[in-house]
C-alpha cells in the first residue's frame, strides 16, 4: 500500500540529502501541517500521482499479488521431497509461487470486495471514495457481463416463446425448441468449465449465438414435421 502516509520524501537541505518518510513524525500543530503540505506540493513526484494539483483529491495505491496463493503454502507440503514442493510452489531461489498460477478471478474479486467494504465505512456526503484500477475494472466488468447475460437470456426466452407460439399455435412448438436451447447452453457451458475456459468479453455473445442457431434449426425441423 502506497499513500501520503508512507510516501518517501527526498529533499536537500544545504549540503545534505535527506531521505525520510513524509509523515515520519505525525504533525499536530498547524505550523507543522503547513510545512508537510508545502513539501507535498513542492515535490513533483507527488503531483497527479498521490495528490491532485488542487489538493482536493488523493490516492491510495494498493498493489495485489501477481501470483495466486493457491498451492503456495509450504506447511501443507511438509514431508514431501524438496523437488516436489518446488514444482508446486515455485523455485526456491525466486521465492515466489509457480508462475503458472496467476491470481484467480475469485481472489481478485475478494480483494476488490474487501477494499469496497472498507471504503464504504469512511464514505460521507462530503468525503467520496472511488475505487479504480485494472483489478477493479476486471471485477466490475465481470459482474456486468454476468448480469447482462442473465437479463438478455430471460428476455430472449420470453420473446422467442411468444413468437414460437404465434407461429405454431401449439405447446410442443414452443417447448421443443426451448428445450434444445437449454440443453445446448448447458452442454456448452459445462464443456467450457471442464476445460477451464472462462467467459470473457468476446465470448459474451456465445449464449445469444447458441440461442439463434438452436431456434433456427428447430423451427426448420418442426415446420417440416408439422406439414
Image (spheres, rainbow, N blue to C red):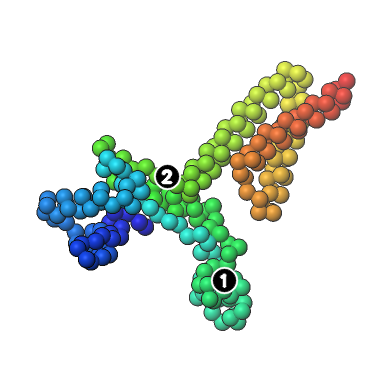
Residue lying at 61% horizontally and 28% vertically, measured from the top left: 155
Q: Is residue 178 left or right of residue 56?
A: right
Q: Is residue 52 left or right of residue 33?
A: right
Residue 107 position, x and y percent, is: 50, 55
Residue position for label 1: 90
Q: Residue 10's spot in the image, x, y percent?
A: 28, 60
How many neighbours does mark 2 have within 10 angstroms: few (below 14), some (14-19), or many (20 or more)? Answer: few
* Front residue of 19 and 131: 19
Q: Nearer the viewer, residue 139 or 64?
A: 64
Quarter of the image for the C terminus: give it.
Answer: top right
Task: Establish if 118 lies above or below 169.
Answer: below
Q: CA distance from mark 1 to mark 2?
A: 31 Å
Figure check: 142 above or below 78: above
Front-most of residues 205 and 37? 37
Classify the position of the N terminus by image quarter.
bottom left
Instruction: Give the residue at mark 2.
Output: 132
Q: Is residue 196 above or below residue 226?
A: below
Q: Secondary structure at mark 1?
A: loop
Whether residue 120 is visible here, answered yes or no, is no
Tag 2 or tag 1, which sits nearer the N-term? 1
The correct choice, above or below, for 178 with respect to 50 in the image is above
Name the outermost residue toward the front.
Answer: 15
Q: Residue 221 at x, y = what percent?
A: 84, 28
| The quarter of the displayed image where residue 90 is located | bottom right
Neighbours of disc 1 within 10 Å: few (<14), some (14-19), many (20+): many
Amino acid at each position: 500500500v502506497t499513500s501520503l502516509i508512507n510516501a518517501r520524501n527526498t529533499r536537500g537541505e544545504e549540503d545534505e540529502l535527506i531521505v525520510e518518510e513524509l509523515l515520519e513524525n505525525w504533525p499536530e500543530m498547524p505550523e507543522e501541517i503547513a510545512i508537510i503540505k508545502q513539501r507535498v506540493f513542492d515535490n513533483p513526484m507527488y503531483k497527479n500521482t498521490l495528490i491532485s494539483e488542487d489538493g482536493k483529491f488523493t490516492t491510495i495505491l494498493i498493489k495485489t499479488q501477481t501470483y495466486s496463493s493457491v498451492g503456495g503454502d509450504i506447511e501443507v507440503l511438509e514431508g514431501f521431497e524438496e523437488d516436489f514442493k518446488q514444482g508446486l510452489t515455485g523455485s526456491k531461489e525466486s521465492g515466489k509461487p509457480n508462475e503458472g498460477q496467476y491470481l484467480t478471478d475469485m481472489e481478485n474479486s475478494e480483494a476488490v470486495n474487501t477494499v469496497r467494504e472498507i471504503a464504504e465505512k469512511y464514505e460521507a456526503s462530503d468525503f467520496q471514495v472511488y475505487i479504480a484500477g485494472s483489478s477493479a475494472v476486471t471485477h466490475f466488468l465481470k459482474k456486468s457481463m454476468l448480469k447482462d447475460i442473465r437479463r438478455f437470456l430471460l428476455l430472449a426466452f420470453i420473446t422467442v416463446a411468444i413468437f414460437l407460439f404465434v407461429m405454431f399455435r401449439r405447446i410442443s412448438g414452443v417447448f421443443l425448441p426451448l428445450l434444445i436451447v437449454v440443453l445446448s447452453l448447458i452442454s456448452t457451458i459445462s464443456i467450457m468449465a471442464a476445460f477451464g475456459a472462462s467467459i470473457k468479453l468476446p465470448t459474451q455473445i456465445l449464449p445469444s449465438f447458441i440461442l439463434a442457431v438452436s431456434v433456427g434449426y428447430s423451427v426448420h425441423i418442426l415446420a417440416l414435421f408439422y406439414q
